[in-house]
Amino acid sequence: MKKVVFALILLVILSGCNEPPQTGEVPVDFDVSYSTGAAHIEWGSTEIHLSHDGTGYMKKTMGRFMETTKNFSVTKSDLQEVYNSVVKNNFFSLNNSYEDPFVMDGGFERATITADGSTKTVNLVNITNERFDAVTTSIYSVVNSKIETQNINFGDYCDAKKSGCEKSFTPECEEWNELCEWGFADAGETQ
């Protein structure tokens, strides 16, 4: 009886474990989300998404209200490049979190990847990880081949708010005044 109970417990445990992706063709459910930013919201953040359906975007934010997004298409070859890096660097075997507790005012990175029915999220806070960095380098390689990331800026946002914010004291306009009028929006453009 003990053997049967043990076997059932083992079966339940193993049935909940997903296998990490294997080399080869990109899985039909392959999906990549990556975000990075500073501890201070006003310094901004970047979010990237690459999807198995061929869509992608890069969104940059600054402060609480400023946001700009660029959409683009990704090919099977683009996804293959990232997928190969995920497999080569054993992304699914990384710890869920890495943090340097001695740095109080730094930044973060987060990647969530889905492949072959498994989803893995890895968070880095104030620290780097060589295998994680290799995967994010492949993500940026794809994005940089699609859009000029250095040209993603908040110029349109700042221009659109100018006429409505010159004599307004709403929180959004206060942020516009601080970040756009003083040029901070241009200083935080690139990653």
Image: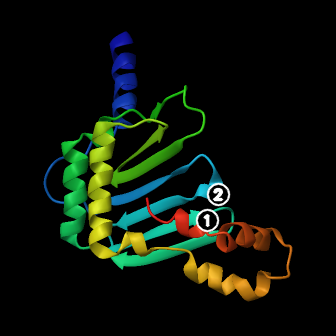
Cα distance in 3D space between marks 1 and 2: 9 Å
Q: Residue tagged by mark 2?
A: 42
Instruction: Give yes or no for contact between labels 1 and 2 (Cβ–Cβ under 8 Å).
Output: yes
| Residue nearest the viewer, comparing 184 with 116 | 184
Q: Is residue 141 above or below residue 162?
A: above
Q: Horizontal placement of 53 versus 41: left or right?
A: left
Q: Residue at x 29, y 38 (%)?
A: 130
Q: Position of residue 82 (x, y in %)?
A: 25, 57
**Count of marks overlaid on the render:** 2
User: To which residue does mark 1 refer?
Assistant: 184
In the image, taking residue 46 as reference, residue 90 lies left or right, namely left
In which quarter of the view is residue 187 placed? bottom right
Residue 96, position as x, y percentages in the image: 43, 36
Residue projecting furthest to the left: 24
Q: Nearer the viewer, residue 186 or 43?
A: 186
Q: Position of residue 103 (x, y in %)?
A: 55, 31
Would you say residue 73 is visible in this rendering? yes
Q: Classify mark 1: helix, strand or loop.
A: helix
Residue 116, visible in the rendered structure:
no
Q: Residue furthest front?
A: 182
The amino acid type of the residue labelled 1 equals: Phe
Three-letter residue code for mark 2: Glu
Q: Is residue 153 left or right of residue 117?
A: right
